Image: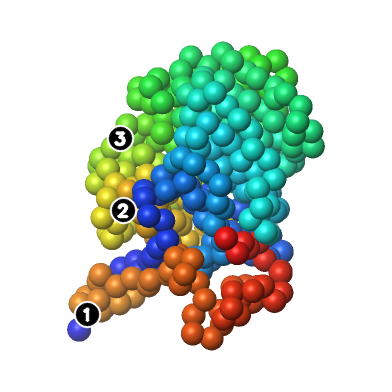
Amino acid sequence: MDKKKIAVPLVCHGHSRPVVDLFYSPITADGFFLISASKDSSPMLRNGETGDWIGTFEGHKGAVWSCCLDTNALRAASASADFSAKVWDALTGDELHSFEHKHIVRACAFSEDTHMLLTGGLEKILRLFDLNRPDAPPTEIDKSPGSIRTAAWLHSDQTILSSCTDLGGVRLWDVRSGEIIQILETKSPVTSAEVSQDGRYITTADGSTVKFWDANHFGLVKSYNMPCTVESASLEPKFGNKFVAGGEDMWVRIFDFHTGEEIGCNKGHHGPVHCVRFSPGGESYASGSEDGTIRIWQTGPVTFDDNESSASIEVSGKISAVVNDAARKVEGFHISTDGKMEEKVEPATES
């Protein structure tokens, strides 16, 4: 029988509602990590390589729209429909700070130096919280023309980018002056904006288009029309030669960066794909869907027989299923059968 190359994902269960945001940490001494935001109000931390569940951050009372980890993967942050953004200890799962807002918070991002947390949402205000002085009032940039959908840092924390829920374009803000320094024009609202790992490109998804912008001179480098409306796109970080996109047709596609040619199509989700992100080394990428699952796909396809084309590897994310018959090893963090921690080496929670 002929062998057919197909991608076999790791399927991560655990969320009870749609997965709306994914974020990979940089590679740390303990590996790299993946955090997911869901409408079920409980962000989850996983081993970025294996998809193994590490912990759940419990405390939000509404959908969580955005999540992130700091550079060292020691703290997590989440933005929620409960009008708050929270900062968590990624080692213990404890809530460190809760920053109250006056409306739904849609976006959050740690600064590169880890000292600041950026938030944005339906208030149309970008806020910068000093994590060294969490009780101090935040710096506010209140000139956004619409409610904020995405927010990120670039230029060594000197610049902020944001996009709006109901307006096209990406706005670049000078942190010191609070003024817009550039607008990257798009026809449709930008639902995903990613700064590449090397700081060269901004990858945006708007409508059925994926665009790549020069992050320093702000010119449009590439623009590709997609087969359907896409909600998210991510550039491969190591070589920058391919990108992944996902959207309403439930498929996760890979494209050649230089030509825009589709070079792979991964099927398996049972609902629209809300978010896609490459791992920091580029060896895999994750997708989050309306179906409540996260799928981690290897960049190089695994070879299976044709009749195994629907194969997938299930990874449990249910808290009750974390401890197997005897014991589980999650990166050197040992959970015995009674659920007690015996050695705390990795970011983990017992929530």
Residue on which disc 2 sits: 291
Which residue is outermost to the right? Answer: 132
The front one of 257 and 73 is 73
* Few, some or many residues within 10 Å of mark 1 (<14, 14–19, 20+): few
Picture layout, residue 35 above or below residue 132: below
Name the residue: 40% across, 42% down.
Answer: 232
Q: Specify whether 158 is left or right of 197.
A: right
> What quarter of the picture does the C terminus occupy?
bottom right
Mark 2 nearby-residue class (10 Å; few <14, some 14–19, many ≥20): some
Disc 2 to disc 3, how far (Cα)?
21 Å
Q: Position of residue 261 (x, y in %)?
A: 32, 48
Identity of the residue drawn at 56% across and 20% down:
125
Query: How far is mark 2 from mark 1, CA to CA?
Result: 32 Å
Q: Relative to 334, is 35 on the left or the right?
A: left
Q: Which amino acid type corresponds to the residue marked 3 in the rendered image?
A: Ser
Q: For numbered disc 2, what is the local secondary structure?
A: loop
Circle on res. 193: none
N-terminal-most mark, 2 or 1: 1
Residue under label 1: 2
- Mark 1 vs mark 3, foreground winner is 3
